[in-house]
Amino acid sequence: MSVPIKIRMAEGCADLAPRKAHDDDAAFDLRARQAAVIEPYDTAMVPTGLHLELPPGFEAQVRPRSGLAAKASITILNSPGTVDSGYRGEVNVIMFNAGRQSFSVARGDRIAQMVIQNLPQVELVASERLAESRRGAGGFGSTGVN
């Protein structure tokens, strides 16, 4: 079953509308609305021209593209970035250059991917005790490196 998600593209950006490269892809490609140069170890906020109207109970997750990470050491800070259902502003991507060379973004380049996620309704309930588990309080490497 398909859930309709309303989008609006900024003026002159219809060609940048998110789309999937393949029908069975999990994510929509997000494209840069304008050019940018990201210097080594620097960030750039890159606009996409995309505005969303997500239904209540949904979020959009903005994630890095594996090809940019593997080939150019480009990732996204605050990843995955969450777009809440009440947000109507332009979706921007916080790109980070972890590489040693400048990275150029051209208008229309695929810079990130977006997954639309249905969120369960949850309620946090205060409790004096939590059930025991095999892992317990171990975290941050407690299960080893292998």
Image: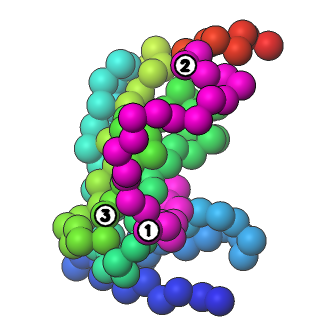
Mark 2 or mark 1, whichever is nearer to me: 2
Residue at the image position 39 percent from the left and 35 percent from the top: 128
Left or right, residue 47 beside residue 102 = left
Question: For the residue marked with disc 3, what is the amino acid?
Answer: Asp
**Residue 64 placement (x, y as % from top left):** 51, 44
Q: CA distance from mark 3 to mark 2?
A: 31 Å
Residue at the image position 37 percent from the left and 86 percent from the top: 6
| Residue 6 in sight here | yes
Looking at the image, is 62 positioned above or below residue 128? Answer: below
Q: Would you name the residue on which mark 1 appears?
A: 121
Q: Would you name the residue on which mark 2 appears?
A: 137
Q: Would you name the residue on which mark 3 appears?
A: 84
Question: Main SS type for the magenta part?
Answer: loop
Q: Quadrant of residue 77?
A: top left
Residue at the image position 74 percent from the left and 71 percent from the top: 24
Neighbour tally class for label 2: few under 14, some 14-19, many 20 plus, Cα within 10 Å: few
Question: For the residue marked with disc 2, what is the amino acid?
Answer: Ala
**Residue 121 placement (x, y as % from top left):** 44, 68
Determine the secondary structure under disc 1.
loop
Residue at the image position 66 percent from the left and 29 percent from the top: 133
Question: For the residue marked with disc 1, what is the amino acid?
Answer: Gln
The type of colouring in the image is rainbow
